Image (cartoon, helix red, strand yellow):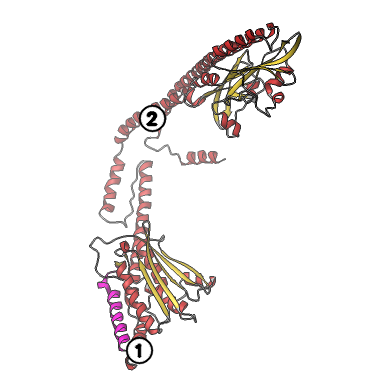
Amino acid sequence: MSWLRYIGKAIRNFHFRKIQALISMSSVTVTIVAVVLVSVLLVERSARTAEENAYMNLGQIIEQVNANLELYVGGMQDVFTVAEKRIQQSPDLHSDVRLGDQLETILSTREDLVTMALFTEEGELVRNLPSNGMRKNTRLTEQTWFESALQYPNSLQFSPPHIQNLFKSDYRWVVSMSKLVPYNDGAQEKQGVLVMDFNFRTIDELSQRVSLGKKGYVYIIDNVGNIVYHPQQQLIYAGLKYENLEPVLNYSYGSYMDNLDGEKRLITIQTVRPAGWKIVGVAYADEFLTTRQELSQFLYGFLLVAIIIIMAVNIYVSAKISQPIQRLERSVQMVERGDFGTNVYVSGAYEVEQLSKRFNLMLRRIRELMDQIINEQEAKRKSELDVLQSQINPHFLYNTLNSVTRMAELGRNEEVVTTITSLSRFFRISLSKGDHIIPLRDELEHVRHYLIIQNIRFKNKFRYEIEAEEDILDALTLKLILQPIVENAIHHGIEPSPEPGLIRIRAVREGELLNIMISDNGVGMDKERLARLKAGKLHSEGGSGVGVNNVQERIVLYYGKPYGLHYESEPEEGTTVTITLPLTVQDSNSREGGI
């Protein structure tokens, strides 16, 4: 096992020669063991007491809610009993005016009593208050309260909450009480279903007043598990919330711990006796059982303070025997004066020996890093030298001057002036007073003159467009990074194509990046040729001599590996090269001139 290997390795690396080993181990071990034992006993005892108190408090809260609901449901039951007796005592239900007045009085004295009605066993209306007409298609005989009254004729039935949809009035959320009762229809005694609808709002308000912490709540179910009330009842019906009702149905009274979605919950249950409903209180353990966590935090804090005190004592004692370390310090001063070639050898305690070994390893690593920096600087200087040496390629200069000579012989003086002017400005920007970093506007100006020269040489075989956002023209960039890309576009993309070409250069800001896209509509490249270009195996012949591979190397040297060239190409569609650089703007005022 991994932890056994770790322990074995720690034992093998342990040395009793350590200066502070015996002192630290003895004092820290004794102190921590004593504190841990006392703290664990305290935490366990206090946690059990807290849990017992939590169960007791929650039970009392739910018991109080149960008492309130039992009182309310008992009142509902009393009202139903009074109405039932009045109906049984009436000699004729249809013609008894006094009965109507009595039922009106009952209805008016209870604000939560919505409707009361008597139906035959076949579902025909006998009498109702208020005297509103019935709605069509109510399916009365299929409703729960009607079926329950017929199925259990000798007991009062309570329905789950539902919408009152029998009579033409407001749709209200009600609980129905129903029972099969006898009544007199003239000289004939019949059986009918008496139903009373009570506004569910009162039960809702009684349940919402309960506070079981920030996340706790109370819900009510009937004796078969139907939800009577839930604070998130819509989510329950929509299937977005779930309550584990199976263990709840096994309890009439009591408490137990439940684990739902990884959260421990304390479930407390009471039964509303008249209705057979169950009140279920849900409290979250992380809100009620916090004593263990608080004491654990106290234990950690106490242990931390104890360890700090013990360490302070150890530091004081170890200071008395720190002379070998002082000798090591005097030896290291040689390295501080710049002698990185000297190894430090100091004998003494185990820690001092290990420190000297680690210090020698550090010196070796410093020397390696210094050599690496020197090599990188040499490569950078070599790359810059290559750029300077390749800025004036005799072959490119020869071809351009040869073109000028032919144009002069043909009397094309205007093109001669344009070519020589662009050539002079091309080389002036190439030199840039020895600067390697220039504004973007100068780099775009440089490539523009190069395009003018090449366009004249190739007899207007291609067009070019140069676009740049105004606010990035002063952004700084390496010089001579665009011309090699454009040279490749002309020689490998436009020149082999029989169609007129287009070279487009766009410079845009993207967050903290400067992206320069060079695209052409030339012959493009297949995947193999594109791979060779990325590998630096394709070179521009007869151009200025500054290769694409050289551009990539210089960008990486100056800015790092995340920056450089990115290629996209499709045969017969063209090629796009994107140069990505960090966006930096020169501190001085914007330079005059344009693209």
Q: How many marks?
A: 2
Q: Which mark is residue 541?
A: none
Closer mark to the observer between disc 2 and disc 1? 1
Tag 1: amino acid = Asn
Residue in the image at 33% along x and 51% along y? 344
User: Could you give the CA–CA distance between mark 2 and mark 1, rounded to whole angstroms?
Assistant: 85 Å
Q: Which residue is labeled 1 in the image?
A: 402
Q: Position of residue 559 (x, y in %)?
A: 36, 61
Q: Is residue 309 left or right of residue 2?
A: left
Q: Helix, strand, or loop for circle 2?
A: helix
Please tell me whether residue 410 is drawn above or below residue 462 in the rendered image. Answer: below
Residue in the image at 31% along x and 56% along y? 340
- Which quarter of the figure is the C terminus placed in? bottom left
Residue in the image at 49% along x and 80% along y? 497
Q: Look at the image and tell me whether residue 289 can be seen.
A: no
Q: Nearer the viewer, residue 500 or 454?
A: 500
Q: Which residues are magenta?
A: 412-437
Q: Which residue is labeled 2 in the image?
A: 304
Q: Position of residue 459 (x, y in %)?
A: 40, 84
- Which quarter of the figure is the N terminus placed in? top right
Q: Helix, strand, or loop for circle 1?
A: helix
Q: Residues within 10 Å of mark 2 (few under 14, many from 20)?
A: few
